[in-house]
């Protein structure tokens, strides 16, 4: 017969249900919180605490210190603390505990890491290397990279696209591999992206991405769809099913190798490059925030540091009194 759950375990289940049902958290977020709290409960059990009423501020602080000492990344430790603080806040509001022992425990500061972007020339080489030939796979790979860079999509957003998420002027888009005419570059379509927490945003699609997507939809996707279930997915694999994140990652890695790019290139590199190149071109940071789907402009502002860094490089190289 299984042991009855402790008061702590019952409290954790109650908070997880609250987060899942009432807060509507995404499944991945709920799973991460469950893992975090399992670690937390094990920590408390090791200190002889099995009742939420018995948790002290020192228990929470020692738990966080243990995470730091274990080598866990500051960002992961911060997320774990978010779960712990949310758990205790919930219990206090529900009247399950007399107070909140986590309220004064500060989260660790994550180191400021500048996102890595590649040059416009490197992006062009990458896209060209991914689209050698006129096969269905080559057409798909070009469309994938053009969209990743052209709309700043996360890899999960790109592979999650359905055909109906695209609103493109296919009749005006060149299908023969030709570059879009200069007069057409001001015209764009739209794409609906589903971001974190199932939040949707509408992003313009430039003519280069429109042209690549049109060629893939007309000459590439039907051949791939004939090999399997097809369905509504925009990007399909060799067996006709929705392209996986792993396969999309491999597309970029293989293209980077063929393009002989020395920089590390990942799907997120395309998103970073999208944001950095927009800011370098004079785009307002608030506009870039909307395009990236960031909840806070603070997240987007890290890209302004990249652009300032580029300005310093140009200044140091070009000004006669800079050195």
Image (cartoon, rainbow, N blue to C red):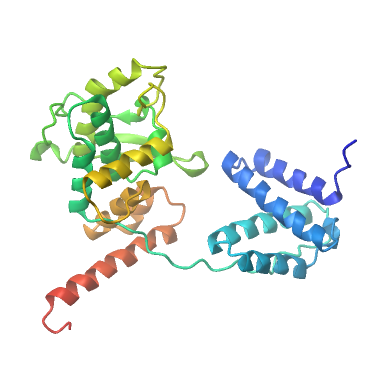
Task: Name the image quarter holding residue 133.
Answer: top left
Instruction: Name which quarter of the figure residue 321 lies in.
Output: bottom left
Q: Which is more toward the observer, 172 or 33?
A: 33
Question: Residue sitting at 61 percent across and 67 percent down?
Answer: 68
Quadrant for residue 61, please give it.
Answer: bottom right
User: Is 185 located above or below residue 269 in the figure?
Assistant: above
Q: Residue at x 11, y 36 (%)?
A: 179
Q: Quadrant of the C terminus?
A: bottom left
Residue 43 coordinates in the image, percent (x, y): 75, 60
Can the viewer see residue 127 in this picture?
A: yes
Q: Is residue 40 left or right of residue 47?
A: left
User: Percent position (x, y) of residue 269?
Assistant: 33, 51
Which residue is nearer to you in this view: 114 or 184? 114
Q: Residue at x 70, y 44 (%)?
A: 16
Q: Is residue 26 visible?
A: no
- Looking at the image, which residue sits at the far left? 182
Residue depicted at x 28% and y 64%? 307
Residue most extreme to the top:
226
Q: Position of residue 49 (x, y in %)?
A: 84, 60
Report the number of numbered marks.
Answer: 0
Q: Position of residue 30 (x, y in %)?
A: 63, 44
- The answer to whether 83 is drawn above or below residue 139 in the figure is below
- The quarter in which the N terminus is drawn is top right
């Amino acid at each position: 017969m299984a042991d009855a759950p402790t008061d702590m375990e019952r409290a954790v289940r109650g908070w997880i249900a609250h987060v899942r049902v009432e807060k509507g958290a995404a499944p991945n977020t709920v799973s991460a919180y469950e893992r975090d709290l399992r670690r937390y409960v094990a920590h408390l059990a090791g200190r002889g605490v099995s009742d939420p009423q018995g948790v002290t501020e020192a228990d929470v602080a020692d738990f966080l210190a243990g995470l730091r000492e274990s080598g866990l990344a500051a960002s992961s430790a911060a997320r774990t603390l978010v779960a712990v603080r949310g758990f205790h806040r919930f219990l206090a509001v529900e009247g399950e505990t007399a107070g909140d022992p986590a309220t004064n425990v500060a989260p660790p500061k994550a180191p400021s890491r500048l996102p890595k972007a590649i040059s416009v020339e490197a992006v062009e080489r990458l896209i060209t290397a991914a689209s050698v030939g006129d096969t269905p796979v080559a057409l798909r790979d070009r469309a994938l990279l053009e969209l990743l860079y052209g709309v700043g999509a996360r890899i999960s957003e790109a592979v999650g696209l359905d055909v109906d998420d695209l609103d493109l002027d296919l009749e005006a888009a060149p299908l023969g591999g030709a570059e879009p005419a200069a007069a057409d570059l001001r015209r764009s379509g739209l794409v609906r992206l589903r971001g974190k927490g199932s939040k949707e945003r509408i992003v313009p699609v430039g003519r280069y991405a429109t042209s690549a997507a049109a060629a893939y939809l007309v000459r590439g996707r039907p051949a791939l769809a004939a090999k399997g279930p097809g369905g509504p997915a925009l990007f399909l694999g060799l067996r006709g099913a929705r392209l996986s994140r792993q396969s999309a990652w491999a597309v970029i890695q293989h293209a980077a190798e063929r393009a002989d790019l020395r920089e590390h290139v990942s799907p997120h590199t395309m998103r970073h490059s999208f944001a950095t190149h927009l800011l370098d071109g004079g785009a307002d940071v608030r506009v870039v925030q909307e395009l990236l789907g960031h909840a806070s402009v603070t997240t987007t502002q890290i890209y302004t540091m990249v652009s300032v860094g580029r300005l310093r490089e140009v200044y140091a190289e070009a000004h006669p009194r800079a050195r």
